Image (cartoon, rainbow, N blue to C red):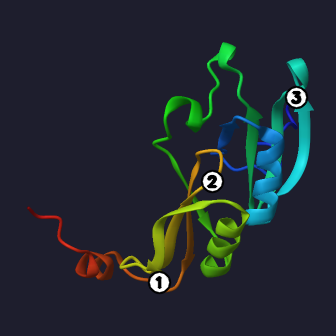
Amino acid sequence: MANVNPIPIGFHTITPLLTVANAADAIEFYQEAFGAREISRLRGPRGKLMHVEMHLGTSRFLLSDEFPEQGKQGPRAIGGSPVTIQLYVEDADATFERAVAAGAKPTVPLEDRFWGDRHGQVEDPFGHRWAIASRTEDLTREEIMTRAPTMEG
């Protein structure tokens, strides 16, 4: 046990686990929209997918069907999600367009932002929100604060 890496190879300290109403469809969507790749899947009761490992860019995320009896419900079942997944990519425009073409709904327009990112947001067909961004400028904290709109009033 002394030689076991406590953080599995390919994972980072924080790894999202997305619960959805139909994980098989979600796998196809994430592959088409974001170029994700399925690593593995484990079926549970009644053929549902209880653990799917996906690779996207330099990261991994996990995916699961809903299991309401265990308290696992997707955003659609609970009326939305307060979480947005930040996805940095080489080309935000191409990724945003590909996600929308695959069935995502634009929620925040893709634009150049004051903090130095080209950034927009979509909601995937399963209710998860994704912020899609590419860094376009490296700015200091002071430069960002100078550009930031005031939040008065």
Foreground residue, 60 or 71?
71
Is 74 on the left or on the right of 32, as rendered?
left
**Residue at 80%, 46% in the rendered image:** 25
Q: Which residue is mark 3?
A: 1
Q: Which residue is mark 2?
A: 124
- Identify the secondary structure beneath mark 3: loop
**Residue at 45%, 80% in the rendered image:** 111
C-alpha span from label 2 to label 1: 29 Å
Residue type for callout 1 = Asp
- Identify the secondary structure beneath mark 1: loop
Which is nearer the N-term, disc 2 or disc 1? 2
Which numbered disc, 2 or 3, marks the residue closer to the eye?
2
Which numbered disc, 2 or 1, marks the residue closer to the eye?
2
Quadrant for residue 23, please give it: top right
Q: Which residue is mark 1?
A: 138
Q: In the picture shown, does residue 151 fall above or below 3?
A: below
- Marks 3/1 in contact by CB < 8 Å: the verdict is no
- Marks 2/3 in contact by CB < 8 Å: the verdict is no
Q: In the picture shown, does residue 11 fall above or below 91?
A: above
C-alpha span from label 3 to label 1: 43 Å
- Which image quadrant: the C terminus? bottom left
Q: Can the viewer see residue 57 in this picture?
A: no
**Residue at 88%, 19% in the rendered image:** 46
Is 139 on the left or on the right of 55, as rendered?
left
Residue type for callout 3 = Met
Foreground residue, 65 or 87?
65
Name the spot of residue 143 as percent of width and height, x first: 31, 82
- Marks 2/1 in contact by CB < 8 Å: the verdict is no
